[in-house]
Each structure stands twice: as structure tokens, then as C-alpha cells.
Image: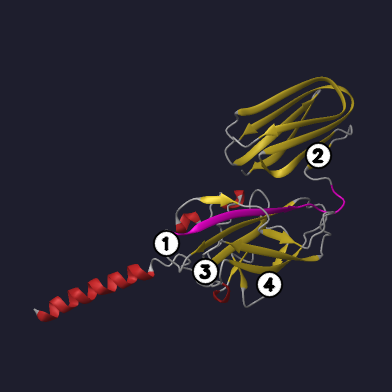
Amino acid sequence: MKNIIFTILFGILALILLESFGTVSLGKIDGTEPGFTGSPGDSLRNCTACHGGNSYKVKDWITSTIPASGYIPGNTYTIKAKNTALGHNRFGFLVSPQKLNGDLLGTLAISDTVKTKLVGNSKYVTYRAASVSSIDSMVWTFNWIAPAAGTGDVVFYGAFNSNQDGHKGGDVTQLSLLRVKESGTVSISNLSNNQILVSTYPNPASAFLNVSITVPQKSNIVIKLVNLAGEVVYQATDIDSFGLVNKQIETSQLANGVYLIQTQIADKLMTNKVLIFN
């Protein structure tokens, strides 16, 4: 009888200890699982899938040595990821440069094997155990080899998580991104045979999306922003337009996701994809 009671008590104690260890938020001490950067290719999944709570958008947490003029195909650049949360002492991150469909753009390369590593068939870079603990912030660096010529814009998507002493309930998840263009290219553009130029920027768009159209002769122009359900969420018409036409679309009230910009110019219809990421 005493053995049975002892076994039960021991089991209860073990469950309590396991539950205590289960409160460790950064459960993956040596890196996190791939597929949670918050990108469209990751189905907008991020750290909250495991850690709970809400995610918040932040700017400039991913920076690079890529010049404003754009990356040169084949060149290697340094990428920096910084996670900041005052009063927190445990930090993690996951970053990946992707197309809208999730394909990897360029090549990730580890420059600091102590603090970072690659996961998901080298599609993602994440933290190592040696870089979890810090005070108020943590910085990681890695390399990126630019993709082939003609790739165009590249977006680095990043998800960051931090907490105090590893206890759930105080987790903070932040999402940040870095968009870079290819040197010598026009960002997200489409040039047709009759020299009609349509550019949409920024992409991803936050708060506002700009549509710039250059037409060589007077034309009727219809611009539509359409979600993937086929619903038109914005439409504008310009009659007998000529030269440069600019439209700014407010996107702050739109749901995050992929949209289509449909530009009808005379008898020609051009379609660009754009990501809304508020």
C-alpha cells in the first residue's frame, strides 16, 4: 500500500516538474522550427503558433549591407537581425528571404556558427543556444549571397520572440521585414510591347500602396485592387490620361494577404501581385 502511495506521489511530483519545465517559452533552446516567419509562403504563421499571444509589426529589425541602389547578383552581403525587449533576457528569431509563394531567394550562409544555424533545408536562419540569453536585446548576423540576375525584389521575412526567464505569459512576438531591390531594376514593374510601364510599390505594402503608370498616348485607365476571393476592394478610373499617372491606395484597413493589382489600359490588361502587410 505504501509503495502504491509513493508511486502516486512520485508521479504527481513528476507532472509538476514537467509542467514547470513546460513554461519555458523558447522551448527550442538550439533554434526554432522552420516555417514560422510570418511570410505569405509560411501561410502567415509566426511564433504565436507555439508561444500564443499576439504578434506586432516593427521596423528595421532586419538590416543589411546591401546599398540603396540594390544588390548585385552573386555578391555576398551581411544581414543583421536584432531583437529588442526591455526587461527581457531570452531571445530568439527566424529569418528567410522568400518569394510570395515561399521559394527561397538567394543563398543563406552562416558567418557565426556559435550564434546561428540554418534549418529547413537551408531556407531559414535561426539562433543557437549560445545566443538565447542576453539583457534587453540580442543581435545575430549572417551572410546572404544574392540570386541570379532578373530575380528582382527580394523580401527578408523575420519573426522574433522574447520573454523574461523563459516563462510563458510574458512572451512578445514581433514581425519585421526587409525589402531590397536588384541593382539596375525598377521595383515590381511590368513593361509591355507598346512601352506601357506599370510599377507598384512598396511591396509588401503597409498603410499605402502606390501605383505608377506611364502611357505613351491618351488612354482610358482603370485600376483595381482585388483580393484572392475576387472582390474588388479599390477601383479608380482616369479618362484620356497621358504620360505619368500616379495613384495612392490606402491599405491600412485591409486584411493582410496577397492581392492583385489589375490595370486596364485601353484594350490591354496587366496584373501584378502585391502583399499587404500592415
Residue on which the image places disc 3: 89
Mark 2 touches mark 3? (CB < 8 Å): no
Query: What whole-number distance in Å separates the C-alpha atoms at marks 4 and 3?
Result: 24 Å
Q: Relative to the observer, which residue lies in front, 164 or 221?
A: 164
Residue type indicated by callout 3: Asn
Q: Which mark is residue 198?
A: none
Q: Quadrant of residue 193?
A: top right
Residue 197 location in percent, x, y? 84, 35
Q: Which residues are magenta?
A: 170-185
Residue 221 location in percent, x, y? 79, 24
Query: What whole-number distance in Å separates the C-alpha atoms at marks 1 and 4?
Result: 30 Å
* Vertical side of 2 occupied by 107: above or below: above
Q: Which mark is residue 168?
A: 1
Extreme front residue here?
Answer: 87
User: Sequence-wise, which precedes: disc 2 or disc 3?
Assistant: 3
Give the position of the N terminus as an image quadrant. Answer: bottom left
Residue type indicated by callout 2: Asn
Residue 59 location in percent, x, y? 66, 52
Q: Nearer the viewer, mark 4 or mark 3?
A: 3
Residue on which the image places disc 4: 110
Residue on which the image places disc 2: 190
Residue type indicated by callout 1: Lys
* Vertical side of 129 occupied by 220: above or below: above
**How many residues crowd mark 1 within 10 Å: few (<14), some (14–19), many (20+)?**
some
User: Sequence-wise, which precedes: disc 1 or disc 4?
Assistant: 4
Question: What secondary structure is marked by label 3?
Answer: loop
Residue visible at 57% across and 33% down in the picture: 229
**How many residues crowd mark 2 within 10 Å: few (<14), some (14–19), many (20+)?**
some
Query: What whole-number distance in Å separates the C-alpha atoms at marks 3 and 1?
Result: 13 Å
